[in-house]
Image (cartoon, helix red, strand yellow):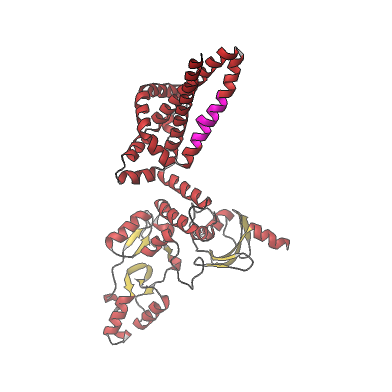
Amino acid sequence: MTLDLGLSIAAILILLVCSAFFSGSETALTATSRARLTELERRGSLRARMVLTLTSMRERLIGALLLGNNVVNISASALATLVLVRMFGDTGAVIASVIMTILVLIFGEVLPKTYAIANPDRTALAAAPLVRVIVAVFGPIVMAVEFIVKQVLRLFGVDIKASQNVLSAHAELRGAIDLHHKEGGVVKGDRDMLGGILDMQDLEVSDVMVHRTRMTMIDADEEPAEIVAHVLKSGHTRIPVWTETPDNIIGVLHAKNLFAALQKQGGDARKVKIDEILSPAWFVPDTRPLPDQLNAFLKRKTHFAIVVDEYGEVQGLITLEDIIEEIVGDIKDEHDAVASGVRQKPDGSFLVEGGVPIRDLNRAFDWKLPDEEFTTIAGLVIHEARMIPDVGQAFNFHGFRFEILKKRKHQVTAIRITPLQQAEGVAAV
């Protein structure tokens, strides 16, 4: 009797160890980082390759581990019940249920899963060889279970395949970056830079171009001396040149070519022939995806393009720097504002030019203003107001107060933006 009791207790303990193994392996293999494992595989780790293979067939993996876990838990409970019933009669079943519930909960579930969550990669790599054997052994049973489950769910109108891959890879990366930022693992600058790379997939040239109303352009019919003065005043190295109408761009004037020609003529601007030093203008559609435009810049080894719409009318210009700024943020020196076209006032409000992109404001001040339908802050105000507002009008939406300060014809050129919490505080004072 004593020998049987000892063997039974030993068997129960072995089954509890197996339960801990199944629970910890399941948690580790589902929580491990595929990115880190991919790097380990690249370095030649066979176990990392084994883990990646197992996680690639997630349903079969989890099914095999759950099957093994249930088998050992039920076996341990049945064995404990058998032993205690022999010792205490019918009361032993109740005692076995209480004891096994506590043991399985602590040592078969919580303890191994807690360790696996704290050390997912190490646990997954250690458990992979044995788990691979278990998946192979239980594979046929798991496949039969999967088939039955899918057929039952299909009766209730649930399609497993349709529910998979709800999030794209970009959305998953974005969620991971935001989560790590909230937990303090990623600083705001890195989050914005990584987010900028991901956002490029959803942007077109029209979203980042300099609009035609803000373009610096030169009339080819002006005197060469006036053109030199315009170039010096603008501070730009490349400027579009037009004739007759601003839509008729005949080329791009590079400051380097202008000053080389000026030096060649002994500093006499009157002898410089502007049309002879112009570079051909490159026209691109406003609907071109931003990654495509970036690749086109790199391929052509040029940094400047004129943006036109479907009718061939000039809409703006885009440079390589504009695209890079979508990733790294504004490229500015010590004299620039926090965001171009924005001035923060002592009362907490912001004086913003109407043409400032919404994305720049969100990135600079960590706001959440929507930028799906409109690019600029003026466009957002007009969209939400459902009218072209007049100077002095104010609107509250998306947690901010927007007051129209300046307007040129039908264009909103200056807006005061105040967070509603600060606006209410000022009003209360």
Residue 393 seen in render: yes
Q: Quadrant of the C terminus?
A: bottom right
In magenta stretch: residue 111: yes
Which residue occupies the foreground of this view, 23 or 171? 23
Residue 298, given in percent of the width and then of the height, sits at: 30, 60
In magenta stretch: residue 284: no
Instruction: Identify the residue shown where x is 36% and y is 83%.
Output: 225
Residue 250, given in percent of the width and then of the height, sits at: 31, 69
Instruction: Identify the residue shown where x is 60% and y is 18%.
Output: 94
Task: Please give left or right for residue 168 compared with residue 42 in the image.
Answer: right
Q: Residue furthest front?
A: 2
In the displayed structure, 270 sits above or below 305; it is below
Residue 121, given in percent of the width and then of the height, sits at: 41, 41
In the displayed structure, 92 sits above or below 393; it is above
Which residue occupies the foreground of this view, 141 or 204? 141
Residue 316 seen in render: no
Q: Residue furthest right?
A: 429
Instruction: Identify the residue shown where x is 42% and y is 59%.
Output: 326
Which residue occupies the foreground of this view, 231 or 224? 231
Query: What is the chief secondary structure element of the magenta stretch?
Result: helix
- Point out the stretch of residues depicted in magenta: 100-113
Residue 418, given in percent of the width and then of the height, sits at: 61, 61
Task: Please give left or right for residue 391 compared with residue 337 in the image.
Answer: right
Task: Please give left or right for residue 96 compared with residue 59 in the image.
Answer: right
Q: Residue 403: which quarter of the image?
A: bottom right
Q: How many marks?
A: 0
